[in-house]
Amino acid sequence: MTARFATSRERMVQEQLHPRGVSDPNVLKVMSEVPRHLFVDDAMQARAYGDHPLPIAGDQTISQPFIVAAMTQALQLQGCEKVLEIGTGSGYQAAVLSRLCEKVYTVERINTLLAGARKIFDQLHYYNILSRLDDGTTGWQEHAPYDAIIVTAGSPEIPEPLIDQLADPGRMVIPVGDRSVQELQYLSRKDGEIKVQRLESVRFVSLIGEHGWKND
């Protein structure tokens, strides 16, 4: 079983990630190592490394591997960063980030998801991930500023609290748009100047909260 999943991870990297422009060797290495199948229901483990998102509890999803890798690569992590993640979900994105930075702070509004993710983090000994049950659109002010911020749900706009909690220099990736389709945006801050670059069209579940969508 372990060998089968290792082969699946390597195939995922070679067939889904590398051909689409994911070239950061550290990101590719981590994607080939983190056991994605542990972050989905047992009945879906055979599909864990497929080129598609999968449903998880709370009417949420685990993003397809390429989106996880592309968003991670966009953050340009060097290993010493403090990263804020909004939307823990299954925990897979936080797990990937934790292998590439110093510490991950992840915020989730659905308790069952957060509890499940925390259990897997502990199982894998990923102890540099700190989690919180809260409205992610308000960030996590206590530990700000963050070198990088990643938002794994679609927002109608970039939440101001997240911009305020971004370090200088700092970078953020976030899906912005309506509730059916969004544009993945890359926001950078350097010397007080903020620039926003549009990356590609994506489709995420809605970011619910005070500075996002108001309800489900």
Image (cartoon, rainbow, N blue to C red):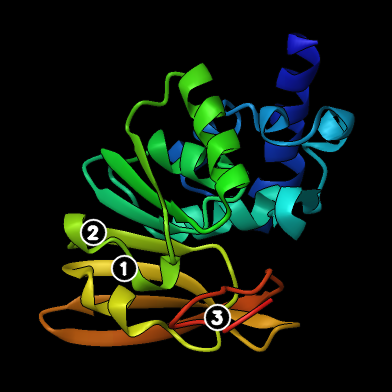
Q: Is residue 205 left or right of residue 127?
A: right
Q: Residues within 10 Å of mark 3 (few under 14, many from 20)?
A: many
Residue, disc 3: 155
Q: Nearer the viewer, mark 1 or mark 3?
A: 3
Amino acid type assigned to the residue bearing label 2 in the image: Asp
Cβ atoms under marks 1 and 3 closer than 8 Å: no
Amino acid type assigned to the residue bearing label 3 in the image: Ser
Q: Is residue 25 left or right of residue 152?
A: left
From the top left corner, tell me how far across and down residue 206 is, in percent. 64, 74
Q: Is residue 97 left or right of residue 188?
A: right
Q: Is residue 92 visible?
A: yes
Q: Residue 10, relative to residue 94: is it above or below?
A: above
Q: Nearer the viewer, residue 33 or 177?
A: 177
Q: Residue 57, relative to residue 139: is it above or below?
A: above
Q: Secondary structure at mark 1?
A: strand
Cβ atoms under marks 1 and 2 closer than 8 Å: yes
From the top left corner, tell me how far across and down residue 163 is, in percent. 28, 78
Query: Which labelled disc corresponds to residue 147?
Result: 2
| Residue drawn at (86%, 37%) of the image | 47
Amino acid type assigned to the residue bearing label 1 in the image: Arg
| Residue drawn at (54%, 46%) of the image | 93
Mark 1 vs mark 3: which is more N-terminal?
3
Q: Secondary structure at mark 2?
A: strand
Residue, disc 1: 171
From the top left corner, tell me how far across and down residue 174 is, in percent. 49, 72
Q: Residues within 10 Å of mark 2 (few under 14, many from 20)?
A: many
